[in-house]
Amino acid sequence: LLLLILALALGLTLGRSSGGIKNTFLERCQKFKDLNCQNVWDAFQQAYIDRDPCSIPGDAYEPFITALSLKLQCNRMMFWSKTKDLVHSFTQKQDCFVTVEDVPLGAILDGLTWCGKEGSKETFTTGCPGWSDCANNPVRSFWNQASAAFADAACGDVSAMLSGSIETPFSPGSVFESIEVRRLRSPKVKRMNVILVMEENAVTNCTNASLENLQKVLNAGISYGCKEVTEAQIHKCSSDPKIACGACW
Ligand code: APR
């Protein structure tokens, strides 16, 4: 009887850990209307299932990205780098700015880890390669591809919340620097507004050398602006939806 109970407990634990990511995926997916979440899950899985987890190219996620059809309003897209918690606490409280993690493409997978294995049909959430263990890992390739799709869809004035608490707010090798900024195209994109977050420990301002670099990398024809904004101002803006859209900074 003891063995039976142990076997049952083990079975339940294993069942839950392998079913965990699918449940999380479907729960998050179902919050968005008009999505066939089982189809979306199938399109997602085919990117990495039964494959070496260090050989997943970004374009393996194209069927998944297509299944989620990015619908974005011009002038509202918000990019970010090294400001994850702050930018999301802001975008979740108001409707004027949207990050990729606020639309199904990013929201469904934000914070999750997954991979497959050759010879298996399962999705694993442990023992997967980390962000920098190999370049073509399932998680990193996904975010690279999703960020590229988000940047390709950008139109009008775009914003980027960057950190004034580091020496290089436009950080070499970041997704924002290496992928997103380089894909913005004039005249579809008109302007890049940098919101530089000034905390008490700020080490720089809008004259930062890496921001000069950002302006050089931007496609000719896209204008540029930078505003130094305190964290307190950002929190204030998100608590008052009336000022968040235009009058905030
Ligand atoms: N190890 C693990 N995760 C990492 C690493 C790393 N070395 N680098 C990046 N990430 C993941 C983490 O989930 C992290 O929170 O990417 C996220 C963003 O990393 P940042 O360096 O802060 O920013 P950046 O690389 O510029 O990416 C942000 O990409 O998510 C999109 O559109 C979004 O504009 C945003 C940009």
Image: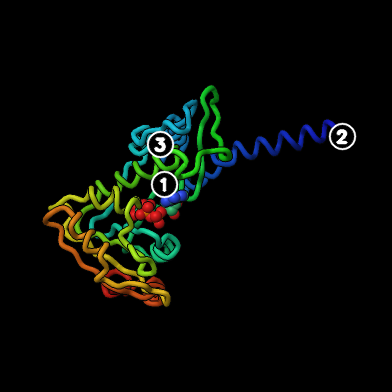
Q: Secondary structure at mark 3?
A: loop
Q: How far apart, in angstroms, are the residues tagged by discs 2 and 3?
A: 45 Å
Callout in the foreground (2, 1):
2
**Would residue 93 appear left or right of 194 to someone viewing this image?**
right
Q: How far apart, in angstroms, are the residues tagged by discs 3 and 1?
A: 32 Å
Number of the label disc, if any, that sits on residue 33: 1
Q: Which residue is mark 3?
A: 136
User: Which of these two is toward me, 222 or 75?
Assistant: 222
Amino acid type for the residue under numbered disc 3: Asn
Callout in the foreground (3, 1):
3
Q: Which is nearer the N-term, disc 2 or disc 3?
A: 2
Q: In x, y percent, where is residue 91?
A: 38, 62
Label 3 with label 1: CB-CB less than 8 Å? no
Label 2 with label 1: CB-CB less than 8 Å? no
Q: Which quadrant holds the C terminus?
A: bottom left
User: Residue 137 occupies which quadrant of the picture?
Assistant: top left
Q: In x, y percent, where is residue 65?
A: 35, 39
Q: Which is nearer the N-term, disc 3 or disc 1?
A: 1
User: Residue 189 occupies which quadrant of the picture?
Assistant: bottom left
Q: Which residue is mark 2?
A: 2
Residue in the image at 33% along x and 63% along y: 169
**Would residue 52 appear left or right of 228 to someone viewing this image?**
right
Number of the label disc, if any, that sits on residue 117: none
User: Which of these two is toward me, 147 or 208?
Assistant: 208
Amino acid type for the residue under numbered disc 2: Leu
